[in-house]
Amino acid sequence: MTLSRQLVTLLAVLLLLVFVGTFFISVQNARTYLEVQLESHAQDAATSLGLSISPHMVDDDLVTVARMVDAIFDRGYYQFIKLEDIQGEVLINRELSVQVKDVPAWFIEYLPLKAPKGEALIMAGWRQAGRILIQSHPGFAYRQLWGNVSEIFGWFLASALFVIGLGLLLLRVVLSPLKEVEWQAESICNREFPILDKLPRTRDLRLIVEAMNRLSTKLRTMLTEHEDLAAKLREQAHQHPVTGLANKHHFMATLNYRMASPEVCSYAVLCLIQLRDLQGYNHKHGYAAGDKLLCQMADVLRDIAAEIPRHTLAHLSGGDFALLAEDYRIDEGEILGQRLSDALAGLYGNNTLLPVDNGHVGIAYFDGKQDASQLLIEADEALRVAQSKEANSWSLIVPEEVEKETARSATEWRSFIQQALASDRVALHLQPVYSCPHKEMLHHEVLVRLIHEQDAEQLLVAGTFMPMAESLGLSAEIDKAVIERVLLLLAESTDPDFRLSVNLSPASLQTEGFLDWLEDKLWANETIAKQLIFELPEYGAVSMLEQVHDLIKRVSHFESQVALDHFGRGFSSFAYLHSLKISYIKIDGSYLNQIDENTDNRFFIQALTDIAHGLDIKVIAEAVESETIWQSLKTLNVDGGQGYCLGRPAAWQNT
């Protein structure tokens, strides 16, 4: 019960107690007064009538006496008048039945009035001739008592309603700051930290509001400081101090994870960019000029990489840079190589201290078969080939056998994807996600496969076809097909706790009408919508926060959840997490490489979980590929894990 209701209830109880006490005393006083009046009335009448008829009793003139008795009795104020002789024999008896009009019977029953008898002696000279007995009629007294009680009750009811109404109004005014404090507390729970500028006049409430304002400010400051500290330490551990790009350690961890995860990356191009004779440039122009050149080169590479949806750009050491362009085909790698070559040549126009030959680019194509070391060797070989050519040249090394699926043209890819959707060649695999440290089932992630048109046993993972689907504008159609299939199978499931996470492409959120379609689907499946989780990659979500907010707002009505996948792939600030009402984040697998030995990654994960938990967001680690990693996560306050060590993807089995 709210405080206002408690106070109103207390006020009503107090008013009721006051009324009951006042009412009881008033009724009892009125009742006693009326009974005294009835007694006095009867006694006065008896005395007066006794004196009046005494002279006639001397002559035994009962006729006259009877007339005098009737004259008084006929007025209707008496219940009975009796005349008795000295032996008690009734000489004259007049009685009137008790009939009370306009008074409820229950009132008479619960509040009976005593009507005492009046008595007077009748003298015949010096001799007692008899006595007269009179009892007043209580009807008039009952009407008067009923009228008094009704007036008292009516006055109290009107007063009570007025007092309660006034009390409610005053309580609303006085306690209105508590509503704002409640809103402030809810906002803090929702990862917002508002300040109430308007302070109440009531001293106690003002102190509460001031304390809540201090709490909100303190929590915001603590989280901000924690975020800043985590960002600085991540910068020190994973970014080059001069250019701000990812350092070699971070790049190698990312490269190893991507090359070993076909679900994440099925094909890519790796570019090694080397500035020519940086050491000689430093000796000739100074290290400050050398650092400036490196920053210029980093800015040029950032501009080029900004047009690549999934990429990792790093400054390896000295004049060596690396760019991993995920989901890039051979023809796109050739275009990228030419752009990088032009960028190297363009440095001469921006820096007259440079020679015409500024550097070279070596490119290797990843077709899903090489490991990170082999890919680096191929890229280095391509760099040596480029260095043997003209100034600012580039070279691309392609494996002898390129995966057929990645060699499809855009038209062939469009036809393949559309036919797969039309003929229902969509397969769903599930990978479990467990809680940490108790390893209890949290949910399953849905992994999408497309069945080959010629070989039903051959399945294409999402990392192979989704990049082309996004570039061709077909990602929304794939997401719709997956969601429809998931909803259908969830409806057939008998386990209400069976939950599934579905990956949404960022391009789908930008497709006109997709969110309306999704909302309609959830309305049509409202009973099972709460079993759905929608995952978005962080690198896409941060670039379209407005659409993500819209998604969260729409699906939260159905108790569906939204989460961020591959968190930490870039170096974006944690600040945007304050405004997103997401359920959990998945740490990118590159941070789990050798986590038992890498203190920097351990600290980053620990800091990230502290920040996320402060925002009521759970943290799940992806790519848990060994028991060593799983045991390390148990010490880092992580909420869950997913990976081959915990469970491999398997074809859907309805539960």
Image: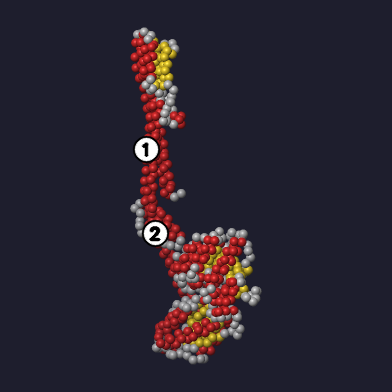
Nearest the camera: 237 or 224?
Answer: 224
* Relative to 90, 640 lies left or right: right
x, y percent for residue 117: 40, 20
Q: Can residue 564 be seen in this snapshot?
A: no
Residue at left offset 59%, top offset 84% = 399
Residue type at mark 2 is: Asn
Residue type at mark 1 is: Trp
Measure how far apart labels 1 and 2 are at the Cα level.
46 Å
Q: Nearer the viewer, mark 1 or mark 2?
A: 1
Contact, mark 1 vs mark 2 (Cβ under 8 Å): no
Which disc number belongs to residue 7? none
Nearest the camera: 253 or 448?
Answer: 448
Which disc number belongs to residue 155? 1
x, y percent for residue 215: 41, 59
Q: Quadrant of residue 433?
A: bottom right
Q: Secondary structure at mark 2?
A: helix
Tag 2: Cα neighbours inside 10 Å, few (<14), some, or many (≥20)?
Answer: many
Residue at left offset 58%, top offset 70% = 447
Q: Earlier in the sequence, mark 1 or mark 2?
A: 1
Nearest the camera: 440 or 635?
Answer: 440
Residue at left offset 41%, top offset 11% = 86
Quadrant of the rendering where the C terminus is positioned: bottom right
x, y percent for residue 32: 39, 27
Which disc number belongs to residue 213? 2
The vertical placement of 384 against 248, above or below, is: below
x, y percent for residue 580: 47, 65
The vertical placement of 450 against 219, above or below, is: below
